[in-house]
Image: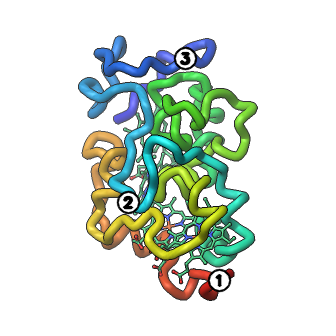
């Protein structure tokens, strides 16, 4: 189970190098304190910046609708309800790009205060100025999920079952050139 009792009083600036967790969080003791990055492709990891899910909605309204109805869009609200919205040990999996230069830092970063599109597909600044197939390709095997859906916090995780409830496939893609 997730431990809820050690909420910090403010967001600590992320550290770049992995550090041992000060407080043992089930399943995360050996992780660093940045968001797990999925194995997205078609993204320049040096240059691309996070832009927020709202930017995607104009061209991918169906994917946006699925996402808005999913737990991912409310993931920071969940932390707030548990008085953990300032705890980096929680925020890193409940937000987008925490610990990276253009990622979520404070509650003022409202557009990144969720497990947004880019938490899975990768930072989208390049794609939105030159939209094309190839950006953020993930595969359908769960490798995009298991950095966050770890056995201790998501014991029932199976890609097929979980993907089925957030499915947003080809029918949701915009027409070419859109
Ligand atoms: C950046 C971390 C992160 C990644 C990557 C991620 N998830 Fe999640 N997921 C979460 C969090 C956090 C929640 C809980 C949200 C809440 O309710 O507050 C969640 C919840 C869910 C839920 C809702 C579970 C329920 O019973 O309510 C589904 C379904 C889901 N994720 C599917 C997936 C799939 C499929 C993938 C991979 C394609 C994935 N997730 C990748 C963090 C992540
Ligand atoms: C390693 C990534 C990770 C970390 C760290 C993490 N969570 Fe989560 N959290 C998840 C995922 C993934 C889910 C969805 C699990 C599922 O439904 O299978 C989740 C679900 C939850 C839920 C249940 C949401 C719901 O309504 O169903 C709560 C509450 C929660 N997390 C609080 C916290 C708190 C508080 C912390 C910090 C102590 C924390 N989480 C740290 C990934 C994480
Ligand atoms: C200006 C319109 C536009 C915006 C904004 C936009 N996209 Fe796209 N996107 C496209 C087009 C066009 C394609 C190619 C369509 C196709 O593959 O049929 C595409 C393809 C994709 C693909 C599929 C890639 C593939 O290889 O099939 C993903 C994933 C994606 N977009 C995610 C996003 C995300 C996430 C955002 C926000 C960060 C976003 N898009 C913003 C137009 C846009
Ligand atoms: C929890 C992880 C996750 C989130 C959040 C997420 N996606 Fe996806 N998305 C996937 C996966 C997995 C696929 C299927 C594998 C692939 O096409 O790479 C996919 C596929 C797509 C595709 C291609 C569909 C096709 O038919 O090829 C588009 C477009 C897309 N997503 C857009 C978005 C947009 C826009 C958002 C936010 C509103 C979003 N996604 C949020 C995981 C996610």
**Above/below status of 42 relative to 21:** below
Which quarter of the rendered image does ligand 2 occupy? Answer: top left
Which residue corresponds to the image point at 60% horizontal and 23% vertical from the top-left? 86
- Estimate the spatial distance between the alpha carbons at disc 2 and disc 3, rounded to whole Å: 27 Å
Residue under label 2, please give it: 41
**Above/below status of 29 relative to 124:** above
Q: Secondary structure at mark 2?
A: loop
- The mark nearer the N terminus, 1 or 2, is 2
Q: In the drawing, what numbered circle is on residue 85?
A: none
Q: Residues within 10 Å of mark 1 (few under 14, many from 20)?
A: few
Residue 171 falls in image quadrant: bottom right
Question: Closer to the observer: label 3 or label 1?
Answer: 1
147 relative position to 77: left or right: left
Task: Say if mark 2 contacts mark 3, CB within 8 Å.
Answer: no
Nearer to us in this view, 53 or 21:
53
Which residue corresponds to the image point at 40% horizontal and 67% vertical from the top-left? 137
Q: Secondary structure at mark 1?
A: loop
Can you give x and y, in whole percent of width and height, for residue 163 in the image?
40, 70
- The mark nearer the N terminus, 2 or 3, is 3
On whether ligand 3 comes within 8 Å of the CB at mark 1, the answer is yes
Q: Is residue 120 something one can see in this rendering?
A: no
**Above/below status of 88 relative to 103:** above
Residue under label 1, please give it: 177
Residue under label 3, please give it: 13
Nearer to us in this view, 10 or 105:
105
Q: Secondary structure at mark 3?
A: loop
Which residue corresponds to the image point at 57% horizontal and 26% vertical from the top-left? 84
């Amino acid at each position: 189970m997730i431990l809820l009792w050690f909420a910090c009083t403010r967001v600590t600036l992320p550290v770049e190098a992995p550090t041992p967790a000060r407080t043992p969080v089930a399943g995360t003791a050996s992780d660093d304190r940045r968001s797990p990055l999925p194995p997205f492709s078609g993204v320049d990891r040096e240059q691309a910046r996070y832009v927020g899910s709202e930017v995607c909605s104009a061209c991918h309204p169906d994917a946006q609708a699925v996402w808005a109805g999913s737990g991912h869009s409310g993931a920071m609200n969940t932390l707030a309800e548990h008085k953990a919205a300032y705890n980096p040990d929680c925020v890193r999996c409940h937000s987008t790009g925490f610990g990276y230069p253009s990622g979520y830092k404070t509650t003022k970063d409202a557009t990144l205060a969720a497990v947004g599109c880019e938490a899975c597909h990768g930072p989208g600044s390049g794609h939105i100025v030159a939209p094309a197939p190839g950006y953020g390709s993930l595969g359908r095997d769960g490798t995009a999920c298991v950095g966050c859906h770890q056995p201790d916090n998501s014991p029932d995780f199976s890609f097929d079952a979980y993907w089925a409830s957030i499915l947003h496939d080809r029918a949701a893609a915009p027409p070419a050139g859109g």
